[in-house]
Amino acid sequence: MAQHISVLADEVIALADPQPGQTVVDATVGVGGHSTLIWPRIQPGGTLIALDQDPTMLAIAQGHLTDLPIVWKHANFEDLPAVLDELRIPAVDAILADLGFCSDQMSDAARGLSFQSDGPLDMRLDPTRGEPASALIRRLSEKELADIFWQYGEERFSRRVARQVVETRKATPIATTGQLADLVRRCVPRSRGHAIDPATRVFQALRIAVNDELGALERFLQVVPDCLKPRGKVAIISFHSLEDRIVKKAFRGMPNLVKELTRKPVQASEQEKRDNPRSRSAKLRVAQRRVDQDSPLTT
């Protein structure tokens, strides 16, 4: 049973403003929460294209929305141009990307995304692509590991953790989430007054590296303008500063292509934060495709 609650749902609908007959892409469909809200607003005559790099999430969403003629695609959002080419759709009216993780993904010990339960140290969102986290832990140098832990997790003790990983793997392969979490906890002191587990930042960093999350986001943002119709909108929900910084820079770095509709990111209301703690770190940014590259957007 899905546990996930879509964040900033009302804000996404209000700013993206899907209309009857439009073609909309949910580029990270997850369990289908946002798609459930978008679908009725683009009817009659609308088309909803649902992508997800995680085949398990795609299957769950299909199960929830089984009666709707949605176009389902197992694909990373950076592959959107190829998906549209395959469907012979030159451009769409709106694109949504929710960069967060579904509760169902995090709670599945077999995925290795969380240290709450012991499981294989995999972390791949798409098990058909790339290598698991255990392979990175096994082959990367101490410096490379330290750089990942610092750059993607902002872990202050990144060098200490990387050194311990290298020393430990000489004697014992680090193959499970429990092994890695215990190793990190021995290296990183727990901050006084903070409930966050010392392993949190290292796990985040390793997951980002395994899935090339920031690289995929940058590549996605580069192709988004060409995938949108004039006045088409792109809405992106990020959950940590590294992602939000990339989105903000991309939106402001293409003044001839897109106009920001959210100069500051939209955040959850106090009520939503109480109802859904996951929404506390969510930031929504929305931009609109200009009419053409040479003239300003007319509203």
Image (cartoon, grey):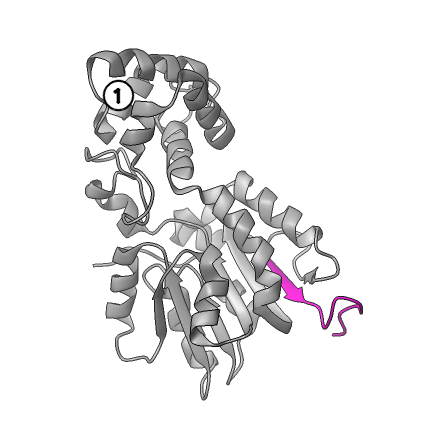
Residue shown at 53%/63% (left/top)? 11
Percent x, y of residue 178 = 22, 27
**Nearer the observer, 192 or 52:** 52
> Label 1's element?
helix
Residue shown at 44%/26% (left/top)? 149
- The residue where tag 1 is placed is 182
Rendered position, 178 above or below 224: above
**Nearer the observer, 61 or 73:** 73
Assign the N terminus to one quadrant of the image.
bottom left
Q: Is residue 235 left or right of residue 113?
A: right
**Nearer the observer, 299 or 249:** 249
Percent x, y of residue 214 = 50, 42
Q: Is residue 60 left or right of residue 241?
A: left
Residue 189 appears in the rendering: no
Percent x, y of residue 103 = 31, 50
Q: Is residue 169 left or right of residue 258?
A: left
Q: Which residues are magenta?
A: 284-299
Magenta-drawn stretch contains 191: no
The residue most toward the bottom is 44
Residue 251 appears in the rendering: yes
Rendered position, 225 above or below 38: above
Amino acid of disc 1? Asp
Secondary structure, magenta segment, majority class: loop
